[in-house]
Amino acid sequence: MRSAKDFFAPLAVGAPPPVREIPFTPSRMIHFFDPSNEKMVAKAPDIAKKVDVLLGNLEDAVRADNKEAARAGLVRVGKESEFGATQLWTRVNSLDSPWVLDDLTTLVTEIGDKLDVIMVPKVEGAQDIHYVDRLLAQLEARAGLSRPILVHAILETASGMANVEEIAGASPRMQGISLGPADLAASRRMKTTRVGGGHPGYLVRTDPVGEDLSEGRTTYQQDLWHYTVARMVDACVMHGILPYYGPFGDIQDTVACEDQFRNAFLLGCVGAWSLHPVQIEIARKVFSPAPEDVRWAKRVIAEMGDGTGAVMIDGKMQDDASVKQCRVVAELADQLAARDPELAKEYGNE
Ligand code: GLV
Ligand code: MG
C-alpha cells in the first residue's frame, strides 16, 4: 500500500512535484488534428486561435504507416508554434501498441515544456495510469521539466467503465476523463456501428391502446449514454478532475451533435472533442452557459444574500441548494469570460 503522505512526492528523482489541484482552464472543445497531414499542420496555428485545446492525435484515425510521421509532425508543431492561452494536448497510442513508448519518450523529451496534457486511450484500470505516471516522471526528470504533464484517460473499455472511480483517483496527474463511445460500444458488444450519439432502435413505447398492437403507440428514443456519462461525471467530481463527452462522428448532423453535447453539458461535462471545424462553434455555444442563465444565476446569488434561508423570485423558491447551482453557472461564466472577450460582453463582465 502506498502511504497517503507519498502521494504528492515525485515518482522519480528530479521530476517536478505533482500538482495538488487540477486547474480549471477552459477546455470546451478539444480539437483533434492529424499531425501526419501537412495541410493540417500548416493550419494548426490558425485553428489554435479558435479553440481552447488543440490536440495532436497519434492514435486511431492515423494509419499505421503514418504513426511516425504524426509523432514527428507534432514535435514540429510544438517546437515552431506559440499557442498563447490555448492548451496543447496529445493522444498517444494505446499502451499495448508498438508505438506508445516512442510516443511518450519523444514527446516529453522534445516538447514536454509545451505539452499540457497527454490523453491515454483504452485505459482499463488504475494500473495503466500508474505505468504512465512513473514513466512520465522519469522522462520529465531527464528532460529537466519544471511542471508535470497531466494525464487524461479515455473511458472506452468495459473494464475501464467498471474501474472508472479508481482510474479517476489513480494519480495527482489525472486531469480528466473523456467518454470514448465508439471503442466503448465495441468493447461492450453494443450493436450501434457509429461514433457516439443516439440510435433510433433504442427506445421505449407506450402501452397498446386496443387489440391492434401496432396502432396509436408513440415511441421515444432514449439516451444510450446516460448511465455512462453520469457515472463518469460522479467519478471525476469525486476526485477533483474534469469530465468530457468525446467524439460525435456524424459531422453533417450538426443538430444531433449539439443535442449530444448539451446532454453532456447539463449532466456536468465541461467540454467535448471537435473532429471538424464545424463542431468547434457547436462546442463553444453549448459549453458556455447561455447569457440568460448567467443573468438568472447572478440575480439569485444577489437576492440570496449570505446564501442561507429561502426567497421567492418570479414565483420560484430559491434556497441554499439552488444558490449553489447558480454559483456553478456564474463561476463558469466568469472563468470563460476571462478567456473569451465576446462572452465577457454577452455576460456583462467587461
Ligand atoms: C474515441 O476514441 C472513441 O473510441 O469513441
Ligand atoms: Mg477510441
Image: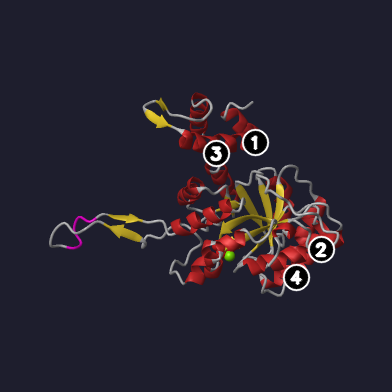
Answer whether labels 1 and 3 touch (C-beta < 8 Å).
Answer: no
Q: Is residue 284 left or right of residue 1?
A: left
The residue at which mark 3 appears reads as 328
In the image, residue 149 lies at what x, y percent? 75, 55
Q: Earlier in the sequence, mark 2 or mark 4?
A: 2
Q: Is residue 184 magenta?
A: no
The residue under label 2 is which amino acid type?
A: Ala
Residue at x-position 69% and y-position 59%: 4
The residue at which mark 1 appears reads as 340
The residue at which mark 4 appears reads as 101
Q: Nearer the viewer, residue 270 or 285?
A: 270
Ligand 2's image quarter is: bottom right
User: Which quadrant of the rendered structure holds the C terminus?
Assistant: top right
Answer whether labels 3 and 2 touch (C-beta < 8 Å).
Answer: no
Q: Earlier in the sequence, mark 1 or mark 3?
A: 3
Query: Closer to the camera: disc 4 or disc 1?
Result: 4
Quote the CA–CA distance across marks 3 and 2: 37 Å
The residue at which mark 2 appears reads as 12
Query: Closer to the camera: disc 2 or disc 4?
Result: 2
**Taking 308 as reference, is 77 above or below it?**
below
In the image, residue 323 lies at what x, y percent? 49, 33
Query: Closer to the camera: disc 3 or disc 4?
Result: 3
Quote the CA–CA distance across marks 3 and 4: 40 Å
Q: Is residue 214 magenta?
A: yes
Quote the CA–CA distance across marks 1 and 3: 18 Å
